[in-house]
Amino acid sequence: MNEAIKVINLSYSYPDGHKVLKNINLNIYRGEAVALMGPNGAGKSTLLLHLNGILSGDGEVLILNKPVNPKNIKWIRSRVGLVFQNPDDQLFSPTVFDDVAFGPLNLGYSEAEVYQHVKRALEWVGMTGYEKRSPHHLSLGEKKRIAIATILAMPCEILVADEPSSNLDPRSKWGIVELFKKLTMTRVIASHDIDFVRALCQRIIIIDHGEIVADGSVDETLSNHALLSEHGLAATVNTE
């Protein structure tokens, strides 16, 4: 399989000197759905922010065989769509249409192309008819769908999502699962939600204290209760 993401010896420290990532090496392949798990503060979100160049540490990140650097950053960000944990961090326009159109407009699409991309993205996420609504008046589940639509409106090949099921009611959560299942692109999902991960992903990477401590299949990893307990995840597992 071709690599969608390759991370080589990546380390990152915050300005206060705290080292958040320590010599991370990983490969994620095209079409994979991979869960990134670990306790709070393990470095999951920091790693995700390196995948489209929001953060830049020591080491190398390759996206679809191109290095993440200033020269390639516009192309990288058109191919790697990042969905933040809080959709209010992502939605800033007066209408849903404007938010979803923002990416295509910045890529220089014509008015007709922008309209078609917005229409298709909203259809994908089940939000057709919301074009004139204010994102800030929507429910959390609806906001998360619109945030995903902002990614799908671009020529995105990799979807990176930070805790997409957090704070959702069960109906909204399983709606997001079904939406993600329809996508054929590479998906990298940081999550504490075992049911969400089990339903969607084939592989789990566990990060703790800024290091990768496990990388295996979902069934193999979730059946290793000693491993989960050691890295603060056991309490989230339903053993029934």
Image (spheres, rainbow, N blue to C red):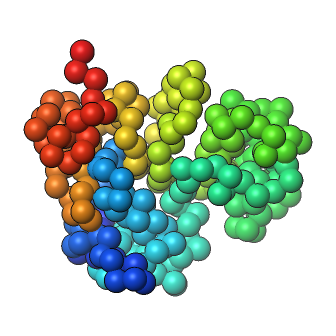
Q: Nearer the viewer, residue 105 or 15?
A: 15
Task: Name which quarter of the figure residue 197 lies in.
Answer: top left
Which residue of the protein is positioned furthest toward the right in this rendering? 132
Q: Is residue 61 above or below residue 104?
A: below
Image location of residue 141, percent across then percent down: 64, 34
Q: Residue at x 89, y 42 (%)?
A: 132
State whether residue 120 appears in this view. Answer: yes
Task: Name which quarter of the figure residue 14 lies in.
Answer: bottom left
Left or right, 192 with respect to 82, comes to left
State whether residue 125 appears in this view. Answer: no
Q: Residue at x 47, y 45 (%)?
A: 163
Q: Residue at x 27, y 34 (%)?
A: 235
Q: Nearer the viewer, residue 21 or 118?
A: 21
Quarter holding the C terminus is top left
Image location of residue 86, percent across then percent down: 59, 50
Q: Residue at x 78, y 32 (%)?
A: 128
Left or right, 103 with respect to 192, comes to right
Q: Is residue 104 above or below residue 127?
A: below
Q: Is residue 6 above or below residue 81?
A: below
